[in-house]
Amino acid sequence: MSTLHLVATPIGNLEDISARALRVLGEVCLIAAEDTRHTGRLLQHYGIQTPCLSYHEHNKLIRLERVLVALAAGDVALVSDAGTPALNDPGYELVQAVLAAGHQVSPVPGACAPIAALVASGLPTDTFLYLGYLPRRQVERQRLLQSIAGLPHTLIFLETPHRLLAALADLIVQLGDRSIAVGRELTKVHEEIFRGTISQAQAHFTTQSPRGEFTLVLAGGTAGPERWSEERLRSVLQQVQDSPEKPAALARRLAAESGWSKSEVYELLKTLKAGR
């Protein structure tokens, strides 16, 4: 049976491709590429003339059969625009189909933005959680962050430049002012890795307009208080809601004591006051 090779390609610097990857790309009968024009420039740079087939998010299901037919004749390579294919890029369904058809799947490792950012972040690398792109909608983004706030693992996200500041604002509200490394344009000419707290990153990218591709690496959560039940939190809020303490300060204080996020406490406090 033939083999589908998952070939990692450079995330910026064209030198970041292995000798094995170049050999495989030159030997396979077909390259399934996320963007054939983008991959074509890489192949031209290295003098590789293997034919390419467009395989991306919008045609990945209808192109499965074309790839399987090609595998009947010989090996095929799958590449994304940058980095390791099938990681935040099309490929999962193809790998499943290829395995189901009895072919082999072989990784050809190489560049990977999340791992590159992690090892250069200065944050713990022994245990980490990669979550891809943060949700676009703020409500969904906040819900995700609330669900992982207490996890001890180093966290890795991808983000776009036009959503970076909004994401940092939600990170600090939901996770606190943790240590963060923000990798920008990794391996490229204008590579930057900002290290500091989330609030410092906010200030930095407010004065310097975000440009390029971003990878965020955050410190994991620390063990906090045992989370109160909603009934207990409601009871305490009913007792203190008429205090002279400002609602934001009250929410912050009770969040630290209850294991709930500040935004959750604040919303519950508003609900109680509205229902009086």
Image (tube, rainbow, N blue to C red):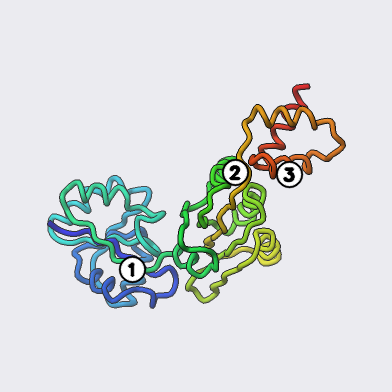
Residue 105 position within the rendered picture, expressed as x and y whole percent measured from the top left: 23, 57
Q: Which of these two is toward me, 126 or 267?
A: 126
Residue at figure coordinates x 73%, y 44% from the top left: 252
Instruction: Give, as a three-letter code, the residue at label 2.
Output: Gln
Element on which disc 1 rests: helix
For residue 250, above or below residue 157: above
Instruction: Give, as a three-letter code, the residue at label 1.
Output: Gly
Q: Nearer the viewer, mark 1 or mark 3?
A: 3
The label on residue 142 is 2
Position of the C terminus by quadrant: top right
**From mark 3 to mark 2, how far is it between C-alphas?**
17 Å
Q: Quadrant of residue 19?
A: bottom left
The tag earlier along the polypeptide, 1 or 3, is 1
**Residue at far right of view:** 244
Residue 240 position within the rendered picture, expressed as x and y whole percent measured from the top left: 80, 32
Residue at figure coordinates x 57%, y 58% from the top left: 219
Badge 2: residue crowd in 10 Å (few <14, some 14–19, many ≥20): some
Q: Which of these two is toward me, 201 or 147?
A: 147
**From mark 1 to mark 3, how far is it between C-alphas?**
53 Å
Q: Which residue has dot 3 on it?
A: 252
Tell me whether the residue at label 1 lies in contact with that at label 3, contact meaning CB atoms closer than 8 angstroms.
no
Badge 3: residue crowd in 10 Å (few <14, some 14–19, many ≥20): some
Residue 88 position within the rendered picture, expressed as x and y whole percent measured from the top left: 41, 54
The tag earlier along the polypeptide, 3 or 2, is 2
Residue at figure coordinates x 54%, y 60% from the top left: 217
The tag earlier along the polypeptide, 2 or 1, is 1
The label on residue 40 is 1
